Amino acid sequence: MKRKITFQPDNVTVTVDDNTNLFKAVKSAGVYVLSSCGGKGNCGKCKVIIKDGTVEPGKSQSYLSQEEIGRGYVLACHSHAKSDLVVEIPPESRMQAKHKIATGAKTEELLRLMKEAGGCLESRTSRICLELSPPTIDDNIADYERVRRGLDQAGFDAAHLHMNYLVLSKLPNVLREGKWKITISFFNVGSVLEVLDIYPGDATKTRYGAAVDIGTTTIVVYLVDMANGHLIGTASTYNSQVKCGDDVITRIVYATERNGLRELQDLAVSNINTLLADLAEKNSVPPGMIDYIVIAGNTTMEHLFYGINPEYIREEPYIPAATFFPLIRGKSVGFQLDPQAMVYSMPNVASYVGGDITAGVLVSQIHKQEAVSLFIDIGTNGEIVLGNKDWLVTAACSAGPCFEGSGIKFGMRAMEGAIEEVEIDPKTYEVNYRVIGDVKPIGICGSGMIDILAEMYLCGVIDQKGKIREEIGSKRIRRGESGLEFVLAWRIESAINKEIVITEVDLDNLIRAKAAIYAGFATLLSQMGMGFTDIEKLYIAGGFGRYIDVERAITIGMLPDLPVEKFQFLGNTSIMGAYYALLCDRLRHEAEEIGRRMTYMELSVSRSFMDEYMSALFLPHTDLHAFPTVIRELEERKKG
Amino acid sequence: MKRKITFQPDNVTVTVDDNTNLFKAVKSAGVYVLSSCGGKGNCGKCKVIIKDGTVEPGKSQSYLSQEEIGRGYVLACHSHAKSDLVVEIPPESRMQAKHKIATGAKTEELLRLMKEAGGCLESRTSRICLELSPPTIDDNIADYERVRRGLDQAGFDAAHLHMNYLVLSKLPNVLREGKWKITISFFNVGSVLEVLDIYPGDATKTRYGAAVDIGTTTIVVYLVDMANGHLIGTASTYNSQVKCGDDVITRIVYATERNGLRELQDLAVSNINTLLADLAEKNSVPPGMIDYIVIAGNTTMEHLFYGINPEYIREEPYIPAATFFPLIRGKSVGFQLDPQAMVYSMPNVASYVGGDITAGVLVSQIHKQEAVSLFIDIGTNGEIVLGNKDWLVTAACSAGPCFEGSGIKFGMRAMEGAIEEVEIDPKTYEVNYRVIGDVKPIGICGSGMIDILAEMYLCGVIDQKGKIREEIGSKRIRRGESGLEFVLAWRIESAINKEIVITEVDLDNLIRAKAAIYAGFATLLSQMGMGFTDIEKLYIAGGFGRYIDVERAITIGMLPDLPVEKFQFLGNTSIMGAYYALLCDRLRHEAEEIGRRMTYMELSVSRSFMDEYMSALFLPHTDLHAFPTVIRELEERKKG
């Protein structure tokens, strides 16, 4: 028996079998619904409202408030259709159109930084236009030999030319269509001059490249004019793999299931295809003109991109299939706009330190400095690099994706409707917040969470362990379904017709995450016999990093208590490093050198890390003396 | 409206639309019917008998005798179904199961010849078995890095290792399945060590290669043990492309039509797949164990094999897309048994001198000798090479496929039922013939045609121009539908219930073909300022060549009148050269060197060739003094 399900507000209808799981139905309808666990039934995020019809709600209720149940909420992943349905995806479960991934890149800035890093416009790709003499009965060499002769005469080393049979199969027609004038795009692979593609006539003026950052959460694309390095356009989107799981671990699990690997690969590739196609169309870039694509992503993202089994990344002793991936043609993974383009991915270091981090170090330039610096990329994971021109050590501190909304009751990414800044009045406990897009709030994003934790601690709403101090007697403190919680926004203030709260469970998760990051710093330093005072600079990379209030992050003990001037935000160094490698082959080599030089520490099995982590499970830290600024701040608040 | 057509004797039924062309119906049924023109309607070969039902026979009748028409014969390509049909494919239109393609190769002989040619067992492929230590938390490098380290420790140059992403994607599972014991197959490409495939455990004992000769008419495969060069098995089949046309020109025309190129490619690949699969099964060779395949074929066959447009081979100035083709993986063209195998094709020289000829020269060794030799490959085309260690010139004399049966009324290939030897009594004109398989004849193959021409000429049944001398008054001479003809086998003697005759049109075609070959020899020699007396050896290659009676071929003026000891039959040098190149990379290089050294002459536009050709349109030649042996033979017959 068939059931019709209509999803609102998108107004998309699908026909499914009776008893079909609603999460599967949403996916088959191509409609977005929030989910952190990929439909496994344990994150409680995929809330939908049954407006009409009957469902078997399964265990939905254990994840919902009485009020939500009363309003028709169920979890899509636990529910099965028992009749035709009209299902609303409520605002808090929707993909938001506007979000705050600032690409905001400027050509001048990028080129200046690249130059400062020792780069120049010397890519592995080039194009040449040849005007050949047409064949005659006395000059009847093969088409391919004619091209080689032409290249030889133009000063190229035609002896090392390689044209694959698919390009070769086009050669006779392209030569004749162009009336013996032909453009050849090349790619240097070691000593071999690989022909990427051929074009009739002169196509040397329209050669492009793309830098791509495949983040666990977000995918960013730069479309670049290879002739001058100019940014033609930038675009970004959420990584559609998010629906299969919020973090790399759930995606690896998903990948090991039937066809999951292929599905994840297709999702990322399809995101990139869409972004590139849009950019090309907007900027009148014809198809076939992108010669080179450089990908940066963490190790799991790169495995998924190539369709390579990431299973053993997850299991001790945490082994990736590869850290350096071979060059491929775009068509191998399904790039549509430019199937002939060569695709390179930034080198990885280990299972949890990937190409996004070698790209980041390349941009930070810590590997060339005399002084010792720390580098951290706060994304879905938290990767740290410590070192200087002589040595580099690195680790991942598995902070988890809670700063991106996962595991936090009202957690969400930094997009419209997210509370991004919070102040709490230390006397009245009244809350002031700012919402992205200046709209009514629907949730809390990472920077908001840091603020909340810092403010609640400084105002004494929570203790050093993150427990809510019920005894202060605020009406904002109440007992909810998962214990004590603090109301940030009252029902009438919110866009979702319910209170936005932070629970003790949320606070616990946040403290674990910040503790992991701090413990990562501390462990790397102690391994090298150093302390925080030995650090010259602390570079913060990552889209989320950019919006962190450093002082607040110090207050909660996520960042070490260093002078503010020692912190420097670098922005999305993953895409910037990919851009460098795209345009300058010397910097691409340098990134590989960085990848080889870095020594990876596996923190998950490190006793020293566990000790540091346990000590950091307090606000700001068990050792309060390591945070003199916070002591001062607490004292000032007391006075105030 | 639908029609059912049943083809006898195969008893295959297809359902087609009303008015469907019978030739298309035969093809869609997968049944073989003889055709030289690929269904263009002008060769008159695709004779079938309508046993039941009605067809619109079109212009069939102009190609058929009154008697054939009376017996229900039509040409499939001209006929359209007007009802359900039962159609018989008569014996003369069928593919014959038994044929006389002698592969008859012996390992000892091949290895001895290869050694004499300076070869040895040094292929581009190799395999190594590595026993790696399993990863631990302290030794947690990536799987691929572990393999590189293992290779490095085993003395390989792992820095130049290249593993493509498809092999890489299998690596994690293969390593764990083999419990960290793994076999890697390699291929040397310049300085790069390309990984062909990986296997769990030790698979070094089972590595194979294949040499493949893609002839216009016949495909031959050798399956070879790469460890010792032993022939595991040989197999051959007719090239299924034959149904799209007998010769390269009709196939090129076919290839330029909608999807024709792809169809021709698939036909050849599918032939090779079948042969390889049969050989592998018979010899218990598991899938995935063929590492290297070397193809030899003429330039058009190689274009079709790669799916590369051969259109401009056919049009003046006769330009191939390439003469050297890039290495590909088996899967690129659709090899099923060993998609990972590397495929190399022997280098071509020009549009009408292909990889089969560079292979042939490699086997003949004329390129290393002091003395000047001639080499001829008499296949569907007729390619000639003249030269020694200092120079090599080559040409194709477009003899056409008439010695393989095309354009000859009762012409057929050398298979069961073909008249292969003929004697005519000079007094009674009675005919003695020998038939392949000692059965009743159904047609005449190439060696039989040469005999007929020689015997008819020596007995005075035809004159120097090949015209039948009606005046001699034999009952075997009669006037048929295309002029005078000579009866070779009476109706009761034949297997097809009709007389087997040779017509003046046939004789004319044969004389043109032999004249083209002789004129080719003469033109190349005169271009080099030489004559036949300067020739030390004349090597005859080609499956057909093996069965030529040299003296008879001299009688008709196809071969020059040299002492018999100067002729040497080499057999199928195309497959032998491929076998050499498969096993010995030095000889593969030598073949490329041969390809580069050969100077190609385009005879079709050569005035000198036209003159030589006109002079050779007599039996044996306008200049009888060039054939003293024939003068003696004629005199002896007169005496006798």
Image (cartoon, coloured by chain):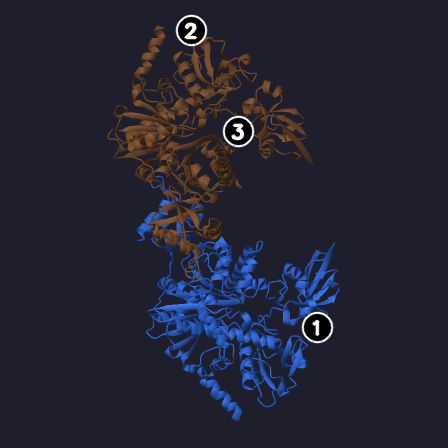
Chain colours: A blue, B brown
Residue B333 lies, in percent from the top left, at 48, 43
Residue marked by disc 1: A68
Residue appearing at x 59%, y 18% in the figure:
B67
Q: Residue at x 66, y 63 (%)?
A: A77
Q: Nearer the viewer, residue B412 or A481?
A: A481
The amino acid type, in three-letter code, at marker 2 is: Lys
> Is A572 left or right of A483, judged from the image as shown?
left
The quadrant in which the N terminus of chain A is found is bottom right
The kind of secondary structure element at disc 2 is loop
Q: Is residue A479 left or right of residue B479?
A: right
Task: Judge whether residue B179 can be spotted in this image.
Answer: yes
Q: Which residue is mark 3?
A: B35
Disc 3 crowd, CA 10 A, few/some/many (<14, 14-19, 20+) = many
Question: Mark 2 — on which chain does it sit?
Answer: B
Q: Is residue B217 visible?
A: no
Say whether disc 2 or disc 3 marks the residue closer to the N-terminus: 3
Q: Secondary structure at mark 3?
A: loop
What element does badge 1 sit on? helix
Question: Farthest residue toward the left?
Answer: B370
- Residue A317, given in percent of the width and then of the height, sits at 47, 60
CA gap between label 2 and label 3 equals 38 Å
The one of B50 and B438 positioned closer to us in this rendering: B438
**Please, which chain is the residue tagged with disc 3 on?**
B
Question: Which of the two residues, A400 or A161, is positioned nearer the viewer here?
Answer: A400
Q: Same chain, marks 1 and 2?
A: no
Are both tags, 2 and 3, on one chain?
yes
Q: Above or below — where is A399 with respect to A344?
A: below
Q: Is there CB contact under 8 Å for labels 3 and 1?
A: no
Name which residue type carries label 3: Ser
- Residue matched to label 2: B427
Looking at the rendered image, the disc whose residue lies closer to the viewer, 3 or 1, is: 1
